[in-house]
RNA sequence: GGCACCAUAGCCAAGUGGUAAGGCAGGGGUCUGCAAAACCCUUAUUCUCCAGUUCAAAUCUGGAUGGUGCCUCCA
C-alpha cells in the first residue's frame, strides 16, 4: 500500500517498523461539545484506513486520544457550572454515541490527557535536562531554536515566519514559535502537582506523551486534520524527537477540510453542522458514505445536493444487495453456466480493482466506483440471464464485504421483519391481480404503502420491503 | 509578509504522460395492467486561462487568474 506522506510530500510505500504490525495515532477531539461533520472526517477516514489494513491481515494498534483539559474545556465547564471532569465524561459519552453510529471502531486505546499527567511531566523533565526548555511567568516553554529540524513537516522557516508576523504575539518568548509545555495554575483552574509547581499540560505535549506511552518512541502513522500540521504536529515532532532522540513518526497523514460555501467548516466560524443533527436528517451511514466519496486529502464541500446524491447512491447499493438476495431465494437449478462463470470472474476483478484503489493512498472514490461497477453488472446480466445461486452469492458477499471495509453495512436488515398479516395482504393482492381486479390490487398496495411497506412486482413474484431511514 | 493547497460536465467527484472512472440530477427508451425497482441509450472532442516541453499533456515546466487554508484555538 502507498500512502501520501506529508513529511516528504510524496506517495510512499507503507513499510511498518514491524512486519505486519502498524501503529497508528490519530488526534482525537477536545471533548467540550458535540462534534460536527468536519470533525467527523478524520474519524471516518482513518477508521477506514484501519479497517482496510485489518482486511489485509495486518495487525493494527490504533490510538485516538481525548483532550480533556484546555482553555475551551475550562471555559465551557464554568459556563455550564459543572466541573471540567463532568464535562469531559458527558462529552466522551456523546462522542461515542455519534462515533459508534458512524461505525467508527473503538480505538485500542482512548487515552485522556488528564490520565497521562505523570508521563507528560516525565517528558517535560527530560526536555528540561536536555536544555530545551525555559521558564516564564506563566509556564514552562519549549525553545524551538534549540531543535534543529523545527519546521520540517510544515516546511516553515523560523526567520521567514517572524519577518511578517505580528510582534505582539511574541510576549516574552525567545522565539515566535516557542510554545508552552506546562501552564502554571490560575485561580479556579484544575491543576496537578509538578516539579515546576501546580499547573496543567500544554496542548501539544499531551499527544507526544500519549503516543509514547502506548506506541513507543517511533510510530508508523500519525494522522489528523490539515490544520493540525502547524503548529500542533510540528511541535509534537520537536518535543518527541528532542526528548526521545529518535524519529517520532514515519508517515504523517493529513485530511482536507469539509467546507461550507468553500469556507472551512469550524466551530469558531459558526458555519458548522453537528453530526448529531445531520444524522437525524440523512442517517449516519449516508454521512459516512458522503465523507468517503471524496478523496481524503481533497477539500469536500458540504451541500444539500451532494448529500442527497449520497443518499440515493448508497440506497442503490443496498437495494442491489436486497435484489440479489431475492434472486438467490428464488434461484432456479437451471441456470446459464457461461454467464454465471462470467459473474464470478467479474467479482474477482472487482476485488482487485477495489484493492488497487485502496492501495493507492486510500482512494475511496475509486473503490466505490469498483463497487458500483459490480452493482451495475450484476443488475444487467441478472435481468437477461438466469444465474446460479452460487455466483449470485459471491457477488452479494463481495458487495457486502467491500462496503464493510469502508465501514458501511449494505445488508438490508429490514427484509426479514415483514409480519405475517402483511404477507397475507400481499398474497391477496396477488390473487386480485391474477383475476385482473386491479382496483382491489391497487387498494391493497396503497394500504401497505401507508403502513410503510413497498411492493414491487418482479418476474419472480411480488417483492415486499420495508421503507426505512438510516 | 511567509508557507501550503485547490480549480475536471447541471451538481458531487476520480484520474497525474497515451487519448476523460463512478455517483446524483436531467432527457429518451425497454419492462409493467399501472407503479416500483432494474436495465439500455443520452449529457465534457474536453479538463480556469496563456505559453512551453513531448510523437503524445487534464496530467510535466513557466506564467496569469480565481478560491481556500495555516502562520492565534481549530479535524
Image (cartoon, grey):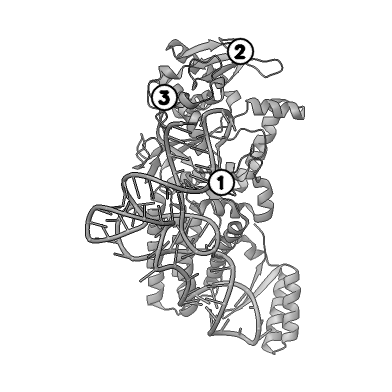
The disc numbered 1 marks a residue on which chain? A
Closer to the chain start, of discs 2 and 1, is 2
Position of residue A84 relative to residue A291, above or below, is above
Which one is nearer the viewer's eye here, A63 or A42? Answer: A42
Which comes sooner in the sequence, label 2 or label 3?
Answer: 3
Crowding near the residue tagged with mark 3, few <14, some 14–19, many ≥20 C-alpha atoms within 10 Å? many
At horizontal 40% and vertical 28% (from top left) the residue drawn is: A218
Q: Position of residue A82 (x, y in %)?
A: 75, 27
Left or right, A167 with reference to A150:
right
Query: What label does residue A150 carry, if any?
Result: 3
Whether discs 1 and 3 lie on one chain: the answer is yes
Spatial separation of the CA atoms under disc 2 and disc 3: 30 Å
Q: Which residue is mark 2?
A: A193
Label 3, secondary structure: give it.
loop
- The foreground one among A232 and A325 is A232
Residue A373: x %, y % from top left: 45, 65
Q: Name the subunit of mark 2.
A: A
Residue A372 is marked as none
Residue A182, position as x, y percentages in the image: 56, 17
Badge 1 marks a residue whose secondary structure is strand
Residue A157 in view of the camera? yes
**Which badge, 1 or 3, comes first in the chain's sequence?**
3
Between marks 1 and 3, how big is the CA–CA gap? 29 Å
Circle 1 is placed at which residue position? Answer: A258
Amino acid at each position: 500500500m502507498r500512502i501520501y506522506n506529508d513529511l516528504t510530500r510524496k506517495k510512499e510505500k507503507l513499510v511498518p517498523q514491524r512486519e505486519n504490525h502498524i501503529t497508528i495515532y490519530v488526534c482525537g477531539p477536545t471533548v467540550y461539545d458535540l462534534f460536527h461533520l468536519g470533525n467527523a472526517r478524520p474519524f471516518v477516514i482513518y477508521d477506514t484506513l484501519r479497517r482496510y489494513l485489518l482486511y489485509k491481515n495486518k495487525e493494527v494498534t490504533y490510538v485516538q486520544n481525548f483532550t480533556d483539559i484546555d482553555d475551551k474545556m475550562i471555559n465551557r465547564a464554568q459556563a455550564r457550572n459543572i466541573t471540567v471532569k463532568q464535562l469531559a465524561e458527558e462529552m466522551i459519552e456523546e462522542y461515542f454515541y455519534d462515533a459508534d453510529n458512524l461505525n467508527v471502531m473503538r480505538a485500542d486505546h482512548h487515552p485522556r490527557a488528564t490520565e497521562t499527567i505523570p508521563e507528560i511531566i516525565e517528558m517535560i523533565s527530560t526536555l528540561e535536562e536536555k536544555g530545551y526548555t525555559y521558564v516564564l511567568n506563566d509556564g514552562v516553554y519549549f525553545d524551538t531554536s534549540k531543535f534543529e529540524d523545527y519546521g520540517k513537516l510544515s516546511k516553515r522557516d523560523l526567520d521567514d515566519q517572524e519577518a511578517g508576523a505580528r510582534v505582539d504575539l511574541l510576549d516574552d518568548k525567545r522565539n515566535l514559535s516557542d510554545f508552552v509545555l506546562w501552564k502554571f495554575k490560575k485561580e479556579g483552574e484544575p491543576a496537578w502537582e509538578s516539579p515546576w509547581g501546580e499547573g496543567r499540560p500544554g496542548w501539544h505535549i499531551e499527544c507526544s506523551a500519549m503516543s509514547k506511552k502506548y506506541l513507543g518512541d517511533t510510530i508508523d502513522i500519525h494522522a489528523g486534520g490539515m490544520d493540525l500540521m502547524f503548529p500542533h504536529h510540528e511541535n509534537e515532532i520537536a518535543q518527541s524527537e528532542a526528548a526521545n532522540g529518535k524519529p517520532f513518526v514515519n508517515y504523517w497523514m493529513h485530511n482536507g477540510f469539509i467546507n461550507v460555501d468553500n469556507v472551512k467548516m469550524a466551530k469558531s466560524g459558526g458555519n458548522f453542522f453537528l453530526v448529531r443533527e445531520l444524522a437525524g436528517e440523512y442517517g449516519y451511514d449516508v454521512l459516512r458514505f458522503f465523507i468517503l466519496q471524496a478523496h481524503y486529502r481533497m477539500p469536500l464541500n458540504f451541500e444539500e445536493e451532494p448529500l442527497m446524491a449520497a443518499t440515493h447512491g448508497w440506497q442503490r447499493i443496498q437495494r442491489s444487495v436486497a435484489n440479489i438476495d431475492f434472486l438467490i431465494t428464488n434461484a432456479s437449478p437451471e441456470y446459464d453456466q457461461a454467464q454465471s462463470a462470467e459473474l464470478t470472474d467479474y467479482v474477482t476483478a472487482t476485488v482487485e480493482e477495489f484493492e488497487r484503489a485502496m492501495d493507492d493512498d486510500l482512494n475511496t472514490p475509486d473503490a466505490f466506483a469498483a463497487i458500483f461497477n459490480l452493482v451495475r453488472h450484476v443488475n444487467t446480466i441478472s435481468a437477461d440471464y438466469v444465474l446460479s445461486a452460487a455466483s449470485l452469492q459471491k457477488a452479494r458477499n463481495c458487495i457486502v464485504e467491500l462496503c464493510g471495509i469502508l465501514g458501511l453495512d449494505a445488508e438490508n436488515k429490514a427484509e426479514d421483519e415483514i409480519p405475517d398479516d402483511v404477507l397475507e395482504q400481499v398474497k391477496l393482492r396477488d390473487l386480485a391481480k391474477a383475476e385482473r381486479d386491479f382496483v382491489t390490487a391497487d387498494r391493497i398496495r396503497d394500504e401497505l404503502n401507508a403502513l410503510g411497506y413497498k411492493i414491487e412486482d418482479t418476474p419472480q413474484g411480488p417483492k415486499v420491503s420495508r421503507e426505512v431511514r438510516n
